[in-house]
Image (tube, helix red, strand yellow):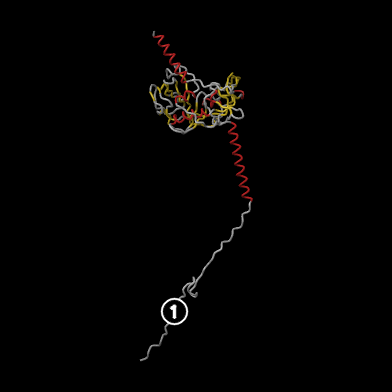
């Protein structure tokens, strides 16, 4: 009896979850590519892996690479095509990540720096072969050192610190665990129950190599260090960790967070215009045109001779005491009367 009850409950839960996580409708107009690509691990070993991906997707703020492959684990709904047939990240992705970022930092600050499913930076491996360091399994949000981090969703804390500064919070309603990596000054512990918006720690840091994504172990192999950034890596995994010890833990696979976050954060599409390679190209052309027009206007102004200044005409009106009175003239001042001085009388 208990077995059948458990089965019924499981079926009901799966049905509810399938409604909440309905797969986005596939965009038949967007195709994936399947082929072998080079990948470089942290020990600089290079291997060829057969992968399926969306090729040359424009993601305007993910680093020096304007066009990058995206894993096929990202539903095609989250990409659009521009007028030249090039792929770009759909506006709804920025709407979702904006909602996550605002919840994470407690306000509209920081930025989204690296998206889920992007092939990470290109680095050199052994024998000078260049390959990808991996596929990004979460979303990176960048702010400044010491910014307070808030729980995007409430739940029970399943991890509260490791060498990567990981905080894990399991949300039973959606049956997902959100991981916050590189967190510093963690202020929660395993077993705590937190609400959405509660402070869990502060923005951490990790060295950045050869682009945006990171792995401090690359420094051991003389891979060029570019700069250091403070950021938080947020990763979504279905299910719950059973232990904070990695050797005893249930292995949870990273998953695309967009649909779950759209539902959980009640994200409404903003209707913003997609930022594509074509639109950025047109913006650059317009910028160059305006700069050229301003330059020509300045040169024309400098080439035109400046006319000599017209001397200022001053009208000076003077009056004195010899002028007649009336009609605007000053009243004449009478001459002083000099009295005669008589010699003293002689008596």
Nearer the observer, 4 or 204: 4
Q: In front here: 56 or 321?
A: 321
Residue lying farthest bottom? Answer: 347
Residue 43 appears in the figure:
no
Image location (x, y in percent) of residue 91: 52, 29
- Which quadrant: the N terminus? top left
- Res 225 → quadrant: top right
Q: Nearer the viewer, residue 166 or 284?
A: 284
Q: Is residue 239 above or below residue 80?
A: above
Q: Which residue position holds label 1?
A: 336
Quarter of the image with the C terminus in it: bottom left
Q: Secondary structure at mark 1?
A: loop
Q: Is residue 260 above or below residue 296?
A: above
The residue positioned 38% from the left and 21% from the top of the image is: 191
10 Å crowding of disc 1: few (<14), some (14-19), many (20+): few
Question: Could you tell me residue 2's position as x and y percent?
Answer: 39, 9
Task: Determine the residue positioned at 60% across, 32% down.
Answer: 278
Residue 258, image x, y percentages: 49, 24
In the displayed orientation, state which residue is furthest to the front: 327
Q: Is residue 220 above or below residue 284?
A: above
Residue 22 vertical position relative to residue 286 in the rendered view, above or below: above
Q: How many marks?
A: 1
Counting from the top left corner in percent of width and height, residue 265 is at 45, 26
Asked whether the viewer can see residue 58, the reply is yes
Residue furthest to the left: 347
Q: On the image, which quarter does residue 3 sit in?
A: top left
């Amino acid at each position: 009896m208990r077995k059948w009850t458990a089965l019924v409950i499981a079926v009901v839960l799966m049905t509810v979850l399938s409604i909440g996580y309905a797969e986005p409708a596939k965009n038949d107009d967007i195709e994936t590519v399947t082929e072998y690509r080079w990948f470089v691990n942290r020990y600089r070993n290079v291997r060829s892996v057969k992968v399926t991906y969306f090729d040359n997707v424009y993601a305007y703020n993910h680093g020096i690479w304007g066009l990058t492959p995206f894993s096929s684990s990202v539903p095609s709904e989250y990409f659009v095509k521009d007028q030249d047939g090039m792929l770009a990240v759909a506006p709804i992705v920025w709407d979702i990540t904006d909602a996550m970022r605002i919840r994470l930092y407690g306000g509209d600050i920081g930025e989204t720096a690296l998206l889920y499913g992007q092939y990470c930076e290109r680095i050199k491996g052994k024998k000078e072969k260049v390959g990808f360091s991996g596929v990004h399994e979460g979303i990176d949000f960048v702010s400044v050192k010491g910014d307070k981090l808030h729980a995007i969703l409430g739940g029970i804390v399943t991890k509260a610190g490791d060498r990567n500064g990981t905080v894990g919070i399991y949300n039973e309603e959606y049956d997902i665990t959100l991981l916050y990596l590189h967190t510093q000054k963690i202020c929660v512990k395993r077993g705590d129950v937190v609400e959405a918006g509660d402070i869990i720690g502060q923005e951490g840091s990790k060295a950045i190599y050869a682009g945006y994504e990171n792995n401090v172990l690359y420094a051991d192999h003389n891979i060029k260090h570019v700069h250091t950034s403070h950021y938080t890596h947020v990763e979504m995994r279905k299910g719950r960790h059973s232990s904070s010890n990695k050797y005893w833990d249930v292995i949870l696979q990273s998953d695309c967070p967009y649909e779950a976050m759209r539902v959980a954060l009640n994200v409404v599409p903003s209707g913003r215009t997609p930022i594509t390679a074509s639109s950025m190209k047109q913006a650059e052309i317009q910028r160059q045109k305006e700069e050229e027009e301003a330059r020509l206007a300045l040169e024309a102004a400098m080439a035109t001779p400046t006319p000599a200044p017209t001397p200022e005409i001053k009208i000076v009106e003077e009056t004195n005491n010899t002028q007649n009175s009336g009609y605007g003239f000053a009243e004449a001042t009478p001459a002083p009367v000099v009295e005669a001085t008589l010699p003293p009388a002689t008596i």
